[in-house]
């Protein structure tokens, strides 16, 4: 019998919450420039998360410092009675000078750079922005810091779709080029239990309506 069979082991549990919806057009690249807040639907989604976690046991609550995540974390903070710890490493990928543009606008304004990016979606950095690889390394480093600070504890983390895709991809050994096939709704929850040797995906993109497992 293989020694690699995954037996139950002590684990650090991280529950990653995607922020609620904003009014920012979904066809545009992620934007730090506009930093949009939650819209009415997004506030409802965040409020639902707050009700879902109420009474659950978490050791800490971390959040990306952008408006949509901090606002979402506020509802969780009330439900969990925990202070929010902002961490810049949990921010969405920055696209630099392309932040807030549609792909068509980026192609029109930066034709040469856009072609380079399309030719190497993982390694190429948009002007002033992050490559996917650099972004993934930043996210993994940040989450490693959280895990080391909270060994064998359960921690809530409010972040964005990009970081959660990175974390799920790495935990499940999914190739980076397939990250966009991981679909996560606004106001959803994803849980990864990190043992000494690997991450176990417990649930993915759950839209909560019962007590958090």
Image (cartoon, rainbow, N blue to C red):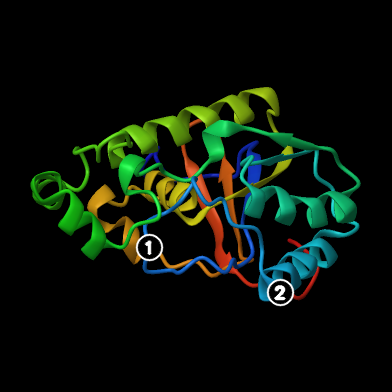
Q: Which residue is found at the position 33% from the left and 47% from the top?
A: 173
Drawn side of residue 56 relative to residue 184, left or right: right
Q: Nearer the viewer, residue 3 or 93?
A: 93
**Number of numbered discs:** 2
Whole-percent x, y for residue 116 in the image: 10, 45
Secondary element at tag 2: helix
- Residue drawn at point x = 78 percent, y = 73 percent: 210
Observer-nearest of 81 and 72:
72
Secondary structure under the numbered disc 1 in the rendered image: loop
Residue 122 shows in the view: yes
Give x and y (percent) for residue 178. 27, 58
Residue 57 against residue 123 in the figure, above or below: below
In the rendered image, residue 142, in percent from the top left (x then y), is placed at 53, 30
- Seen at 89% across and 53% down, the residue is 78
Residue sitting at 24 percent across and 37 percent down? 125
Q: Earlier in the sequence, mark 2 or mark 1?
A: 1
Q: Which residue is mark 1?
A: 28
- Residue closer to the observer: 206 or 8: 206
**The quadrant where residue 37 appears:** bottom right
Query: Where the C terminus falls, by quadrant?
Result: bottom right
Badge 1: few (under 14), some or many (20 or more) residues near its Cα, within 10 Å? some
- The reply to whether residue 208 is visible in this rendering is no
Front one among 45 and 99: 99
Q: Which residue position holds label 2?
A: 40
Between marks 2 and 1, how big is the CA–CA gap? Answer: 20 Å
Left or right, 143 with reference to 152: left
Q: Are marks 2 and 1 in contact (CB under 8 Å)?
A: no
């Amino acid at each position: 019998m293989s020694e690699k069979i995954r037996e139950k082991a002590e684990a650090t549990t991280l529950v990653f919450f995607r922020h609620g919806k904003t009014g920012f057009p979904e066809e545009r690249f992620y934007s730090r420039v506009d930093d949009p807040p939650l819209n009415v639907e997004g506030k409802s989604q965040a409020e639902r998360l707050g009700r879902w976690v109420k009474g659950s046991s978490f050791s800490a609550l971390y959040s990306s410092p952008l408006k949509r995540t901090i606002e979402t974390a506020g509802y969780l903070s009330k439900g969990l009675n925990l202070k929010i710890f902002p961490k810049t490493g949990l921010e969405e990928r920055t696209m630099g000078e392309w932040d807030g543009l549609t792909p068509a606008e980026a192609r029109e304004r930066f034709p040469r750079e856009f072609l380079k990016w399309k030719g190497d979606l993982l390694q190429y950095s948009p002007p002033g922005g992050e490559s996917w690889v650099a972004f993934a390394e930043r996210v993994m480093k940040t989450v490693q810091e959280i895990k080391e600070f909270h060994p064998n504890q359960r921690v809530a983390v409010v972040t964005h779709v990009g970081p959660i895709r990175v974390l799920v991809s790495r935990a499940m050994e999914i190739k980076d080029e397939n990250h966009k096939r991981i679909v996560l709704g606004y106001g959803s929850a994803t849980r990864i239990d990190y043992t000494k040797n690997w991450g176990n995906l417990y649930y993915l993109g759950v839209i909560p309506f019962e007590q958090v497992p």
